[in-house]
Amino acid sequence: MWVKLCCLLLYFLALFVLARVFEAVAWYESGFLATQLVDPVALSFRKLRTILECRGLGHSGLPEKKDVRELVEKSGDLMEGELYSALKEEEASESVSSTNFSGEMHFYELVEDTKDGIWLVQVIANDRSPLVGKVHWEKMVKKVSRFGIRAGTFNCSSDPRYCRRRGWLKSTLIMSVPQTSTSKGKVMLKEYSGRKIEVEHIFKWITAHAASRIKTIYNSEHLKEEWNKSDQYRVKIYLFANLDQPPAFFSALSVKFTGRVEFIFVNVENWDNRSYMAEIGIYKTPSYILRTPEGIYRYGNNTGEFISLRAMDSFLRSLQPEVNDLFVLSLVLVNLMAWMDLFITQGATIKRFVVLISTLGTYNSLLIISWLPVLGFLQLPYLDSFYEYSLKLFRYSNTTTLASWVRADWMFYSSHPALFLSTYLGHGLLIDYFEKKRRRNNNTDEVNANNLEWLSSLWDWYTSYLFHPIASFQHFPFDSDWDEDPDLFLERLAFPDLWLHPLIPTDYIKNLPMWRFKCLGIHSDEEMLETFQDSESDSDSENKEVFSSEKEGSEDDELNMFHRHGEGEPRCGVETCSCANKYCPHEPYERKARSYGSYSTAGDMEPDWSAWPSEMLHCTECVVCLENFANDCLLMGLPCGHVFHQNCIVMWLAGGRHCCPVCRWASYKKKQPYTHPQPLSNDTPS
């Protein structure tokens, strides 16, 4: 998880640097930056009209370019970034679809139950033509959608009883606006009563009703009273301008931020005395002033602070966010981090997508589960101070220059989704390249695995956990009151050795005990030579005795002998296995012959039994490779107590033989530990 988080932070840093590179390239090619002001005199009539439409100011009665230019100047300063965004928005002729209501409940859920938005609904009466034609309605929908106003059509033929109850006996236009200035207030429906069925006239009607919700100030005394008043609103935004009514984007934002931010329009058109404006720091109009408990902030002085709906919406969301805004932000970040797993995971393509789906499900589930206590925590009545301090922190951090850069980059990349996706894919491919190179240096085999091999391993893993859940989750050592586990008998009945071996994961191997083979001392060369000559002189007679005894014994007797050793009797006693050149009387002839043939200096070393685990049997030879234990070699023991070379027994178990090579006890099952016999008091040392 931390690796994916670091990759995501690195990606955001790359986006920030890339945005600065784009700004430098634009400045080199055109000679201006996005924050530079534009002189409206140098713009064409078409560009000026485009700016007015994006800001939501009517210009139908202004045929002269001079009048249009003055209206642009009265509404606010124009920057290069705003002009570029307005022209791109006009060129992108995307068709915005309207909603078709199916009946009363559908209309109620979307229109009357919506508390933070404006709806424009065209009602078509039974056997009547619509009030606005299809062509003009499409233009109307496209125009109002720029300001977050949603549009829909209600055909009374789908629910004539509801239309009669509402009094919609003829085709008309309905506008829904929140009635109060509090969050989740009532919604009022306004019916269009104008005679001119034109887009500009309908839009003026919409903006007039939306602007009526904004508090308007007409004189300095009222401004002084409002400026010094302290009420429930901690954040207020003032518009000082010489306009008849505020722009449409300003009115639409007042509806969207109902209950969070108070919007106030100060009409300075007929003011003679502006001394109080100078006292509070307002020296020019138009000005957008944000007033918070921390101070005054002039909107439009930093990067990306344009006079548009989208720019001011992102600015106010960062200052006064809702819980839903934070949840959506965390949801986007968590999913971006989860998609990094597609590039970090190496191996087959199917494996990548399976891991990705698993990661997406896990991360989103954890996100939702973690948000539930947070929502309950925020609803406690004693956390008002905590809530206020959190908002204060948001306001302090999001009024900095760095925060304005982040907001500008967010608007840029969100308006160019292809660039965002391509940079994310390129970043992921770089992560995939470096991860693949790192794993190849570590000689990881999973990099070259194909889809069929991985699906086969996935099926083995699934069947292993499906048919052998106890063997998968029981780690050694564990406490159990069962000396003989009944699951071993059930597994042998279900999967006989001559038919099919059980599929058991090898994760228990890492829990098996491991230690180093240590010796207490080393004999001199003369003693080693003398011992070797003595052992050679007695070898013939001993070999004959062992060979004859093995002929008399059967394979069943030998298997019973191994089981006896596994149950409690040591395979090699302390007296016979204290040195590697000595042998046990029960060892096969070939093994004893090999122990004589592989004579080395390690054979005269006395093993240090104190370093061995107490439940392990004492022995100095590995029955897998038939080699004596050398000094400082790595040993591994099984639950039955038998000891082997670590490499030998791991290869044995990883090959699918999950049992002891000596006693055939399951290597993943607990067994009663072996207790070494204590010598009697009357026994004389040999």
Image (spheres, rainbow, N blue to C red):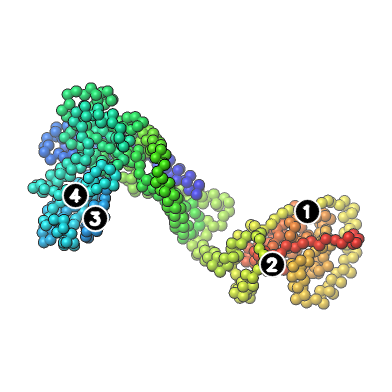
Contact flag, marks 4 and 2 (Cβ < 8 Å): no
The foreground one among 142 and 282 is 282
Which dot marks residue 610?
Answer: 1
Say whether residue 59 is left or right of residue 602.
Answer: left
Residue 128 percent coordinates (x, y): 10, 59
The foreground one among 464 and 292 is 292
Q: Distance between the residues labelled 3 and 2?
A: 70 Å
Q: Which amino acid lies under the numbered mark 1 shown in the image of this protein?
A: Ser
The foreground one among 110 and 166 is 166
Query: Disc 4 marks which residue?
Result: 189
Rendered residue at 25%/42% (across/down): 181
Residue 668 versus residue 53 in the image, above or below:
below
Q: Is residue 572 visible?
A: yes
Rendered residue at 11%/56% (across/down): 170
Query: Disc 3 marks which residue?
Result: 108
SS class of the residue under badge 3?
Answer: helix
